[in-house]
Amino acid sequence: MLGKMVRGLFLAMLAVFAGLLAWLYVAPPELLLVGDSYSAKIVCSNRFIAGRDPAEVMAVDVQAPGHPLLKFVSAVVDEERKTVTTRIFGFFAESKAAYRDGLGCTNLPRGYDLSALSGLPQGPQALPKPSDIAWPAGDAPLADGDARPELAAPLADGKLLGPGIRAVVVIKDGKLVGEHYAPGFTKETPLLGWSMTKSVNAAIAGRLMAEGRLSFDDANLLPEWAGDERKDIRLRDLMGMESGLRFNEDYGDVSDVTRMLYLEPDMAGFAAGQPSEAKPGTTFRYSTGTSVLIARIWMNRIGDFGEATAYPQKALFAPLGMTSAVLETDVTGTLVGGSYLYATARDWARFGQFLLQDGVWNGTRLLSEEYMQAVRTPSRASGGLYSGAQTWIAGPDDKPSSAYGLPEDTIWLQGHDGQTVAIIPSQRLVVVRMGLTPSKLGWVPQPLVKAIADALD
């Protein structure tokens, strides 16, 4: 009798376990889908854009600094089809990302396959960069005569460089004067800027402004907003993160930002669907969704999707010589202007130098004086933290640069996990720092920038 009861209990538990496995396979929780989708995207981009080893990327970039569940995710790379498929525990929450030349990797949300990308425009052709010409026109190795010996100490100081350092590039008086790369990374390695992408995406919109096709004061920006108060949101409000739209930017769970990036096929459509919670221009809410909306808006203004896809290279990357730059898309073809720009540290420095030069490159003004004024001026509701053109006035810890002894005219590009570009016009200095440095470690770049500035003074 007891044996039958034990056997029955065992069979019941086995049935429950089998049901749980079936549930995980058929309808996995969104948190697992987010984790697998994130893993597929990071491995795909780093393999097919940056040329890195997928196993190393999974271990170092995805699992080591991420959610504990990510340690149970496995990745399969299809080199021929240029896809990455991920599953947790080897079976569940399957997710896939696919690579396209010139446009990097795109997540394929649940229910989508490679055919979803077949009708989208192709990416622009890669531009060659001379290897025997000095920066910024080319990418010749830094010559001994150009390297500033004063930088040897700060560029060798591990405490200043921070944990997870990958690259530092220093530009003084428009010249490359020092750089440092961690093992496995070189001047040819494209690196993800994360939210530094926002500043570049805004500048692409700024190029349309310079051409008279877009304006800070434009309203009625999206058809989804035509019937309600959101029609009054101006581009100016979006650029300063003052749209009044609700958006949860918490990355620790299935929030608006993680849902948009890793579960939604139409990122801009998802962001556009967020309700209004305040009058435009009255509150500051940092939002990756806002930057994706800006990308959709300037792409809509161009009209032709193929032309819009090629526009960043034509209008900005090619003129500046940012030949490594790859701006990735969602599955609808909208460029992910809030997060997904890969470029070498030297190309990130080119963009920083471009802003330092007031939006002028090789004697040609590419961004209007009005736009550049917005780059330098805090947005009204941000309390001095953020500019009216998707750059930071305060440093990564929200402290003014003067708190670290840096000039008050310092502006910043900032991205997740320690990506920064410091731009100091008064000292004719640009400092790029790229790495994998979670904010929980407490490292900030201001002491590094200050040490470099002092060494070159």
Image: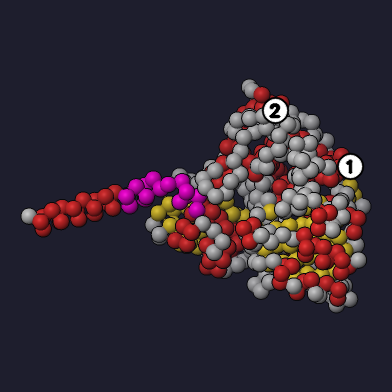
Label ID, residue 279: 2
Amino acid type, residue under disc 1 in the picture: Glu
How far across and how far down the image is residue 56, in percent? Answer: 55, 68
Dot 1 or dot 2: first in sequence order is 2
Amino acid type, residue under disc 2 in the picture: Lys
83 to the left or right of 387: left
Dot 2 falls on a residue whose secondary structure is loop
Dot 1 falls on a residue whose secondary structure is helix
How far across and how far down the image is residue 362, in percent? Answer: 90, 55
How many angstroms separate mark 1 from mark 2 (CA)? 28 Å
Residue range in magenta is 20-35
Seen from this angle, which residue lies furthest top? 227
Residue 29 highlighted magenta (yes or no): yes
Taking the spot 82% from the left edge, 63% from the top edge, the residue there is 450
Mark 1 surroundings: few (<14), some (14-19) or many (≥20) residues within 10 A: some
410 to the left or right of 334: right
| Nearer the observer, 18 or 50 | 18
Q: Which residue is mark 1?
A: 369
Displayed quadrant of residue 226:
top right
258 to the left or right of 194: left
Taking the spot 86% from the left edge, 76% from the top edge, the residue there is 149
Residue 28 highlighted magenta (yes or no): yes
